[in-house]
Image (cartoon, rainbow, N blue to C red):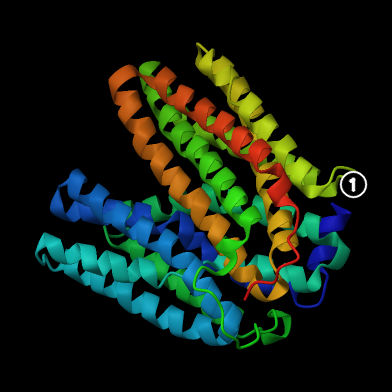
Amino acid sequence: MRTYLALLALPGATAFVTAGFVGRLPMAMRTLGCLLMVSALTGSYSLAGAVSAVFGIAMAVSGPFLARLVDRHGQPRTLVWSAVAHGLGVGVLVAAVVWGAPAWTYFPAAVLAGLTSIPMGSLVRARWAVVAGDRIQAAYALEAVVDEVIYILGPLLVVWLSVHLAPAAGLVGAVVLAVAGGLALAAQPRTAPPLAPVRAEPRTGVIRIHGMKVLTAVYFAAGGLIGAIDVAAVKFAGEHQNPGAAGLLLAMMTLASMVAGLTFGLVRWHLDLPRRLLLTTVVLACGSVPVLFAGTIATMCAAVLLLGLGISPLLVAGSALVESLVPRRGLTEGFAVVGSGVTLGMAAGSAAGGALADLQGSTAAFGLATACGVLAVAVCATGLRLLTPEPVPVA
């Protein structure tokens, strides 16, 4: 714990971590808030699901491009205009739904809101790369734990706002936090990474680095596992006539992930980064096997604890690899690329897991999660050589 306290004691660290926490809490609120708002005001869950899916996909797709603008023009400048644009985009979406505009108008509004959502987690990690020095692995572990906390608090907050205040209050609250956090981070230029040099650069950006392709694919597979597990846990709890247990199962998995991430960040590893990533993918895949055989809520609690041990360590190892593979001037984009990979993987895992759960029950959805874990190991092992940093620079 002293290591993490020492990190937060670095000049400017507590300020940008706090602003980043506020600004990225909405990443666990936006799509759920959109779903709750549209379903409550239109009565259509299919429409709500479609609009929130478009919102989420737009965020995932735009993340790397917005991050590239950050690397080129700097965090303060980009954060200000993106905060304004995102606020306007969400405002248009809320107004369209609340005022009963035609349903087709919700989709372009959701696209606008999603495309202007800047990847705050990537910006904070890029700042750690500037200030953390040789304690960077611990910094990334801290960030992985912050992400876990966000995914616990965000849904609780957005549901409370939407249910107890107004259907649109959850999404409005999310955008208020996003704008406030973004502007607070923009007001801290001293810890912001330096600008990328202005030069001709390929449109493909950091993804042209072969190791980044492998790492993004690993993140996509890991995201698929997480998305499938979320759906499978809900289905499993329902099958055992205890729907409320789903929250307990997911909370226990998140808690195990947090503890594992903090511990992983303090270990002095003798393995190089590529093999460290391979080790964490193997742990994650192996941890997904016991859920296939759990037959009661109690045994499933133990199984998800084992599963959670592999999540944050994989993300910590992956973050360290991004810093190793990508030149400093493209770090924000690099973090955003893998972040989009895991987000899209979660969306795909949730969709496929939900279909399997409806057709064949929770065991099939858990099987999909295990298959995603095996895929992550296969991709990582196959591309292990490519995860070694390349000497070729990228713009």
| Residue sitting at x 68%, y 65% | 326
Q: Quadrant of the C terminus?
A: bottom right
x and y percent of residue 308 in the render? 63, 34
Name the quadrant containing residue 6. Answer: bottom right
| Residue sitting at x 51%, y 45% | 220
In this rendering, the count of numbered labels is 1
x and y percent of residue 381 in the render? 68, 36
Query: Which residue is under mark 1?
Result: 268
Name the quadrant containing residue 379. Answer: top right
Q: Is residue 108 left or right of residue 153?
A: left
Judge whether 208 appears above or below 163 on screen.
below
Judge whether 189 appears above or below 259 on screen.
below
x and y percent of residue 174 in the render? 42, 64
| Residue sitting at x 69%, y 50% | 386
Q: Is residue 66 left or right of residue 175?
A: right
| Residue sitting at x 40%, y 73% | 116
Judge whether 258 appears above or below 192 on screen.
above
